[in-house]
Image (spheres, helix red, strand yellow):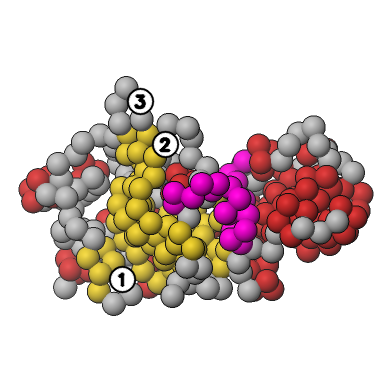
Amino acid sequence: MALLEIRDLTVDFDGPRRIRAVDHVDLSVERESCVAIVGESGSGKSQLLLACTGLLAANGRASGSVRFDGLELLGADDPAARIRGSGIGFVFQDASGSLTPHRRIGDQLAEAAVAARGITRQAALAEAERMLERVRLPQAHRHLAEYPHELSGGMRQRAAIAAALISEPMLLFADEPTTALDVTVQAEIITLLVDLCHELGMAMLIVTHDFGVVSGLADRIAVMYAGRIVESAPAARLLAGPGHPYSAGLLAAVPRLDDPPGTELRTIRGTPPRPGANLPGCRFEPRCEYARAHCRGEDPPFLTTGDDGIACHYPLKQDAQ
C-alpha cells in the first residue's frame, strides 16, 4: 500500500461561477520516494496539496479520497489535528508568509514540536536548535532568538523546512520551495531536501513549474495542466522522452548550458485556459502544435501502460513510430 493515495480528487471553489481547480486527480506516493508535480502557475498544483491537508480557502470544497498511511484525510472533523498526528510536514511557497513575523524562530519551532510530539518546552527548544543545525543553518543557537525579518531569504527557507520537519513527518509536502531564491540558493535547498529525505527515511511530494528543479530529485513525475494530470511516469523515462506535447514543451523551455550565446528562450505558445473554463475537447489543444480535429471535440482519457500514464489522443511516441 502506498504511503499517500489520492483517488478521484476534485477541488471546486464557489463564487459567482464555480471554478474547478483540480479535476478528478489520481496520484500515489510510495514510502521513502519523491514524486514531483510539474506544471505552469494556475494548473492546480498547490490547491491539490492544500486539499490533502484541509487548508483550502473557506469557499473551497474537496471531494474524492485522500488516504495517508491508511487514514482517510478528507472529511475529517478537525483536518489540522489529523494532519499533525498523521506525519505530514508542509513547506509553503512563501517562507516569509509561513513564519509568524512577530515571533522568534525558536518559539515557533518549539511550539510545533510541543504540539506534535508532546515534549516539554525546554526539550522542544533543544530540538529546535538541533533541527536548525540539521538544515545547515550556521550558528543555529543565535538564530533561535531572531525574528524572520532578520534572516536572508535562503535562511528563512531553511527555518521553514526545519519547522516542517520538527514533528518528524513521514511525508513532506514542498510547494515551490525555491520560489524567489537566487539560482545558487535554489541548488542548495534542493540538495538539502534530497539529503534530508535520505537521512530521515521520508517521502516527499514537491510541486514546481520548473523541470530543472526536479531533475535528479524526483523518482516519479506527474505533469499537471488545467487541473488534470496529463502525464505520469518514472522521472528518468519522462525526462528522456516525454509523451505528452505539454510535457515536451515544458522540458524544452528549460535553458541549456550548451545553447549557443544569443539563443532565444523557448516557450509554449498561447496561455493556459481561464480557471473554470468549459472546454469540450483536450484542454491543451489550443496551444498544441500536434493537435488534430479529434482533439477539439473529445477530452482524452488518462490511459495507463505499466508505470506510464498519459491523457493524449496522439502521444509523441506514437507519432515517432
- Dot 2 and dot 1 residues touching (CB under 8 Å): no
Between 70 and 90, the one nearer to me in the picture: 70
User: Between marks 3 and 2, how big is the CA–CA gap?
Assistant: 10 Å
The residue at the point 12 percent across, 49 percent down is 298
For the residues carrying marks 2 and 1, which lies nearer the camera in this image? 2
The image quadrant of residue 21 is top left
User: Between marks 2 and 1, how big is the CA–CA gap?
Assistant: 31 Å
x and y, in percent, of residue 262 in the image: 47, 47
- Looking at the picture, which amino acid does disc 3 mark? Gly
Is residue 79 a member of the stretch shown in magenta? Answer: yes
Instruction: Return the residue at label 1.
Output: 308
Between 180 and 177, the one nearer to me in the picture: 177
The residue at the point 51 percent across, 68 percent down is 69
- Looking at the picture, which amino acid does disc 1 mark? Asp
Q: Look at the numbered disc 2 and give the secondary structure of its residue.
A: strand
The residue at the point 90 percent across, 44 percent down is 145
